[in-house]
Amino acid sequence: MASVSLSDLSIVLVEPSSTQRRIIVTHLQQAGVYNIEGVASGMEALKIMMQYPPDLVISALHLPDMDAAKLIALARKIKSETNIHFMLVSSETRFEELDDVRQAGIVALLPKPFNSHDLEKALATTIDFMEPARLELDNYDITALKVLVVDDSLTARNHITRVLKNLGMSDISKANDGQQAAEVVKNNEFDLIFTDLNMPNMDGKQLVEYVRNELDNAFIPIIMVTSDDAARLGEVKAAGVTAICDKPFEPERYDNY
């Protein structure tokens, strides 16, 4: 498969505000994307998708006739044979407000307002989904990631840290329980959090809820590393965890995720 470039992307932008549409189109053009169709409602977007399925739909969370989750569901229903990707642009950060659209299936969340770095990162993620072969660690600047590892077991913390360092990550902070992690996250920005579930003072589920609800951070990926049973993990998923990995953590087991 030939490599997909930004100039190849066909995008439908769904944004009720004409001013916001112009701003986003300008940002996209500056990033190298030129095939852009802007509309104000979900139905307008669906009509375009039925005739000329785009590579990517960028949508606001709330539209005049539906929300983004419903737009995605309808698009998948009427164009089930076409792999259309969806990106959300929203100033909303509360997990409970974003969970439906996350579950509906989006490749990226773009904060509003966003800068050129945010947009370029989101577009790169979209292309990675279009080209599964690109989903190799070599295509990411792993060394730039700021990671937090949370586990009450020193052995587990050291194991996860060692694995991450072997992958090329170097900016790794550690916390020995959820309470300590909550304080660290409150005062620092991270690109990724790995956390155990069962910990004293504050467990992993409570930490996820703190990050999602108290800090209003729906964007940072949180990976739960645990050996707990499925019943308990259902509660954790509902709290807003991004992914769940078995202990011991072995990233090669998750290459296809």
Image (cartoon, rainbow, N blue to C red):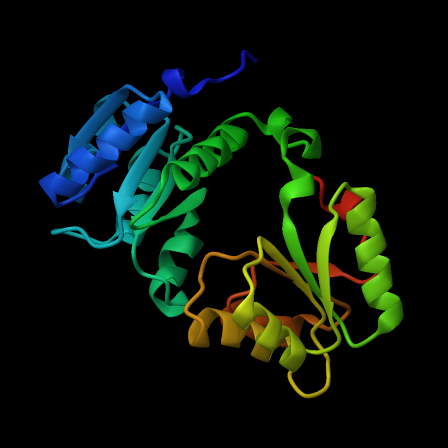
Q: Reply above or below: 210 against 73.
A: below
Q: Reply above or below: 43 against 26.
A: below
Q: Position of residue 165 (x, y in %)?
A: 80, 47
Specify whether 50 is left or right of 228: left
- Residue 94 visible here: yes
Q: Position of residue 42 (x, y in %)?
A: 18, 43
Residue visible at 77% across and 47% down?
251
Residue visible at 36% across and 20% down?
32
Q: Position of residue 136 (x, y in %)?
A: 68, 31
* Front in this rendered view, residue 149 or 135: 149
* Front in this rendered view, residue 233 or 172: 172
- Residue 257 visible here: no
Residue visible at 42% across and 30% down?
83
Q: Position of residue 3 (x, y in %)?
A: 53, 15
The image quadrant where one finds the C terminus is: top right
Q: Residue furthest right?
A: 155
The image quadrant where one finds the N terminus is: top right
Q: Residue furthest front?
A: 187
- Classify residue 133 by image quadrant: top right
Q: Reply above or below: 254 against 177.
A: above
Q: Reply above or below: 170 against 116.
A: below
Q: Residue furthest bottom?
A: 201
Residue visible at 67% across and 70% down?
230
Specify whether 217 is left or right of 52: right
Q: Residue furthest top?
A: 2
Specify whether 114 is left or right of 47: right
